[in-house]
Image (cartoon, rainbow, N blue to C red):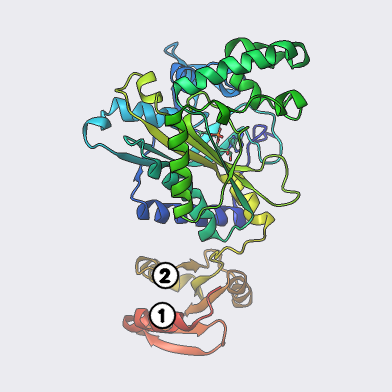
Amino acid sequence: MIQKPKGTYDVYGEYGKKIKYVEELLEVLMEKYNYEYFRTPIFESSNLYHRGVGETTDIVTKETYDFKDRGDRNMTLRPEGTAGIVRSYIENKLYGNTSLVKAWYYGPNYRYERPQSGRFREFYQFGCEVFGSDDATVDAEVISIPVMLFKLLGLKGIKVNINSLGDKESRDNYHNALIEYFKPHINELCDDCKERFLKNPLRILDCKVDRESEILKNAPKITDYLNEESKKKFENLQKYLKALNIDYVVDPNLVRGLDYYTHTVFEVEANVEGFGSQNVLCGGGRYDNLVEHLGGPSTCGVGFALGMERLLTALEYEKVPMPIHNHIDCYVIPMDESVKDYAFNLCMNLRLNGYTVEFDYNNRNLKNNFKQADKLNANFVIIIGTEEKETDIISIKNNHTKESYKINKEELIDFLDENLEECDCD
Ligand code: HAM
């Protein structure tokens, strides 16, 4: 039997309904925030991710799905959304149209990671990127989006961690301090960290192997190396987060696993006992050099991405109820083959009028049809026999009260409009 690839999953049933509910909420939320929907290819030229995400990141060194297409081009399956959105921003010259572009996106990403709970090889991200403003209100707005989403969903156990990586001068000073600090400890670190020490010592702080070691815990903190301008920006961010009543914690060890960040970085984690190690629901930050680095004009940017699977796990973990539609409006039963065409046509017409309607395709007997109507949680059952077909007077039964009605076909929509409102739908 052919099985799904390791680290992937199928969506169907209740889980699919939950995903759809969250997706619909995302759309509404993004409309309120006035973000524009973007969709970029699932594969891009490998160079984009090497240059965009960073040569020393785990994503690029260990996790990308790389392949050569039939034209011998090096391609990579999208491991994250930001690089592609930046490429699109530059390629479509969106910097020319308006000073600010606020983008949102949603789609699958691919990373060859060791699969475990909350970590997949194919996973879905919802994300936002804003180009063209370095004002800290934009950073605060971006952080407010997942916070608002969690609030709308009813997810309570969350913690917002923020930090600043400062500007280039601050990071250069910090870089030197890290080299000085790690030099005497280099042999105590894992092999990857030895490599990171030479190429990008900041990445050591993000190491999954050495994370708990005292050496990492006692490493210098970036917050002690921020210059005045960077400090001011960080203070402003905190002022605006307070204005939005967003509780946060400054975590000086938060550096994030991608190379493009400047100034603000943040993560929101599920803060519930026993949730598991993959508790970061979303993360992001500012990347004021990335557009230029990828060949565009100097433009600042800030954004975040949220893992859909982790969000759903958090919702399940907290047992947050979701208003999932578990009913249909009508179930249509043709009594025999001779009326099936008439009943089928009625069913389609009701759907065209906006009702959720199911049909007995399988010529069940009446008893089984009523069982089926109950299983589908139908509010009304419509039974079509020869008489109904000849007279256009429809037999319809309220499946809750069991009351039966005879309604002229012309008046069926009005009848349903009036009566469905009274039904206890879920
Ligand atoms: P990231 O931290 O790599 O950031 O991923 C963002 C979120 O995607 C994570 O917090 C997590 O919820 C989810 N995620 C990542 N990897 C996996 C995985 N293997 N399985 C399940 N979920 C996963 C970025 O991707 C940046 N592009 C975020 C960003 C946007 N920064 C600025 N703009």
Residue at the spot 44% in from the left edge and 84% down from the top edge? 419
x then y, percent, for residue 133: 33, 36
Of 44 and 354, nearer the camera is: 44
- Amino acid at dot 1: Leu
Q: Secondary structure at mark 2?
A: loop
Kindly identify the amino acid type of the residue bearing the numbered disc 2.
Tyr
In the rendered image, the residue lying farthest to the left is 97
Q: Residues within 10 Å of mark 2 (few under 14, many from 20)?
A: some
Q: Position of residue 312 (x, y in %)?
A: 61, 51
The quarter of the picture where the C terminus appears is bottom right
CB under 8 Å between callouts 1 and 2? yes
Q: Is mark 2 within 8 Å of ligand 1?
A: no
- Residue wearing tag 1: 416
Decide: is 112 above or below 251. above
Tally of marks? 2
Q: Upstream in the sequence, badge 1 or badge 2?
A: 2
- Which quarter shows the N terminus? top right
Q: Quadrant of ligand 1?
A: top right
In the shown orientation, is residue 307 left or right of residue 32? right
- Tell me the residue that label 2 is attached to: 355
Point 64% across, 55% down: residue: 157
Q: Looking at the image, which is closer to me, 215 or 363?
A: 215
Q: Is residue 396 above or below residue 348?
A: below
User: Residue 12: image x %, image y %?
Assistant: 59, 51
Q: Which mark is residue 365?
A: none
Pinpoint residue 319: horizontal percent, then vertical percent. Answer: 67, 61
Does residue 392 appear in this view? no
Residue 203 appears anywhere in the view: yes
Q: Secondary structure at mark 1?
A: helix
Task: Name the residue at 48% across, 39% down.
Answer: 304
Residue 155 found in image quarter: bottom right
